[in-house]
Amino acid sequence: MHTSAQTHVECDVSLVALVGNPNTGKTTLFNALTGYRQRVGNYPGITVDRKSGLLRGLTSGKPIEVIDLPGTYSFSARSADEAVVLDVLAGHRTETGSPDVIVVVLDSTNLARNLFFASQVFELGKPVVLVLNMIDLAEARGLNIDAGLLSRELGVPVIPIVATRQSGVDELRRVIADSLDAPAPQNFAPLPESVRVEVERLMDSIVKSETGADYAPCRTESLQALLDPGGFHETRLIRQGGSWVEGELAQRRERIRATNESLAEVEARVRYSWIGKILERTVTQRQAGHHSRSELADRFLTHRVLGLVVLAVIMGGCFQSVYVWAGPVMDAIDGTFSALGAWAGKTIPAGAFQSLLADGIIAGVGAVFVFLPQILVLFLFIAVLEDCGYMARVAFLLDRWMGLLGLSGKSFIPLLSSFACAVPGIMATRTIEDRRDRFVTILIAPLMSCSARLPVYVLLIGAFVPKRDLLGGFVSLQAVALLAVYAVGFLTAIAAALILKMTMLRGAPHPFLMELPSYKRPSARTVFYRMYEQGKVFCLSAGTIIVAVTVVVWALGYYPRPASISIAHDAQRQAARGAFEAQLPEVAATDTADNPAIQPDGAAAQSRTELEERLAQINRSESGAYLRQSILGRMGRWVEPVVKPLGWDWRIGTAVIASFPAREVVIATLGTIYNLGGEQDETAGSLRQKLHSTKWPDGRPVFNLAVAFSIMVFFALCCQCGATLAAIKRETKSWRWPIFTFTYMTSLAYLGALLTYQILVRFV
Amino acid sequence: MGLLDLQAGDCGIVEGIGGSQQACKRLADLGFVPGAEITMIRPGSPCIIRIGGRCVGLGAEHQRAILLNAV
């Protein structure tokens, strides 16, 4: 992940800010203007990404940096995340510097509402360029927009474009370059005298106050603080200026109210009526607007019953594709990394470096990259559904149901995605604007049973749940057991969401208010870019952390390596080879003399196979002995008293500890620990048999149904995934939340496993 | 008259916005200003309405906040 360490040097690079309402095609335009060479960084203190890139296709002049800002309807803000647009435009954000030109992207089919935000931008005192995006759609709907007249009325350049087809983008580049030193707009929506006077007075009294020299709000900020009681701008002004600002605001508001103005409505009324007059002169409607096709589709797609059925079908198809399409690629990646590890094992002389490379780094990197196909396929679907406008309908359909959990409809897709993998699920929470809803969704996403947990369930259920049919053969007991383990994670997530909404992330329920954009054909460019971006983010941030942790676990499992173990096993190997060689002449003799029917080398080959098996067994016993001696093995025995109440022995404890960076390694670790070598598959009969025959020192078997369920419940509830924690850190921009997630999930997992074992051991 | 009284296909003209200050400002900025025409597309909670040529989903709280006049 890049940081925003790069400083904006004003004399070398000009800065252009791209702003606009949501769903205006702003990101598509940003991609078209900058190409794919973009930098993603942070704004300290908030969770919004700082996306910027250099303007492509400039023939002369100094370079121009374009910065993409989040879509917004208004400068009125409820959180620091929402305020970032005004902060950047007003030059408050030191990471970016003050923009030289502001480009406002408008949806040509919805000019009135889009110009509301533009009219707020006009008042910032900077050169503005208006972009009429989706002009083709407006024309198709019979809207005739006179861009030239609109430009003269507003006193700013107005450029019609179609960002998805890149038409008009070249002209826009030229106009942006020409506007760097252009004058700021001079035509404003005429706010009532009383409002203007009170804004001036408010700014004046803040500047003259003790703290005013450190912090002077701009006119727009003061206006929003005044007109939006309880909003972010008011809160920040009071925090920075001191409590006297509160009284000052109350007094100014009282004076505005005295002129019979409503604080909430005055700005909207004035701006919309100003815009309405301008649009009357510049836009003509050739025929009655027909939104009918989109609305016709919505008759089915947002129907309370039919809509849910369609959604279920789409989601089913999506998840099926995630498995079907990603499966072969994942196998190929897995195979490639295994082959690479085997190759490294063969070519590099045995020793710590070989093991670090093969078992540590290659295995670790492979464990990360194996998820990449799933992430890309999932984001292909999310990007298509989002870009065509369907995602807003999903949020609408499920708002009522998610509301029961205290969440909004927008949490549904991220949570559903988390059943495949929590990492893309957590990344998909970006569409949730409300910070609390987003954080609750992020924190419960890892409780959804992801695909990496499935091998553990399959192994343990296959080994310990009897194969029995229920309900006359319709349902198998094993399937019920699998469903039960999935339900443990899901039900815990519901409880966790309710508790988090009542405690740490408490807040007034967020009422549903969402534009349902007209359906449109998704742009291949936007969809591709979304996949590329998510894939890159995943590889960079999750990759670095998980590889580091894997190397640490490798080191703990590899060191120390006392010479006595290799000496003892070398002796065993020597003995086995000696026995084989001693047998050889004898075998050859028997074959030729007594039993000519048998091929002369048949018995020899058989005993060579026996020798190879014996040597492999000695090697496995050697790696098992090393593991027992290693720090990890000692930790396993050290935690035995802790895990004993869960029904586990030190070997299970070790395997579970080793699987904290990535839970999917547990089967390989169990395999190693049970002296079976590292290549254990969940279907391997031998590991299953070995589990059955493992005994406590007193001869009781270690594994039984209660232990199997205690392990499964632990895996269902525990956050054994470095990639997930890295994703949480990335999305919340703080270590606090991954640490919290890890702590609460590990505690829950331990308690859950303890309860499961202690109850089952008494009744089964 | 309020939004909750509208059946699918019914129209109304925004008279004003009540409810909490914050919700008011947000709704007003989105175009829910006195004089704007609203068509109910799908009643319920949340409902879908058409305002200014676009569709918006609104939860019950916002629906209660918007006061309407008959067309």
Image: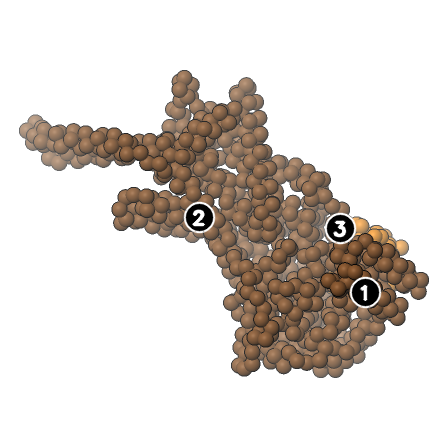
Mark 2 falls on what kind of element? helix
Closer to the camera in the image, A692 or A627: A627
- Residue sitting at the far left: A593
Mark carried by residue A265: none
Image marks 1 and 2: residues in contact by CB distance under 8 Å: no
Q: Earlier in the sequence, mark 3 or mark 1?
A: 1
At a point 88% along the width and 70% down the height, the residue shown is A193
Would residue A700 be found to the left or right of residue A293 on screen? left
* Mark 2, residue position: A547
Q: Position of residue A134 (x, y in %)?
A: 65, 71
Subunit that carries the residue with mark 3: A
Subunit that carries the residue with mark 2: A
* Mark 3, residue position: A511
Would residue A631 be found to the left or right of residue A128 on screen? left
Snapshot quadrant of residue A46: bottom right
Chain shaded brown: A
Mark 3 falls on what kind of element? loop
Chain shaded orange: B
From the image, state whether disc 3 or disc 1 is nearer to you: 1
* Mark 1, residue position: A208
Q: Earlier in the sequence, mark 3 or mark 2?
A: 3
* Marks 3/1: CA–CA distance: 40 Å
Q: Residues within 10 Å of mark 2 (few under 14, many from 20)?
A: many
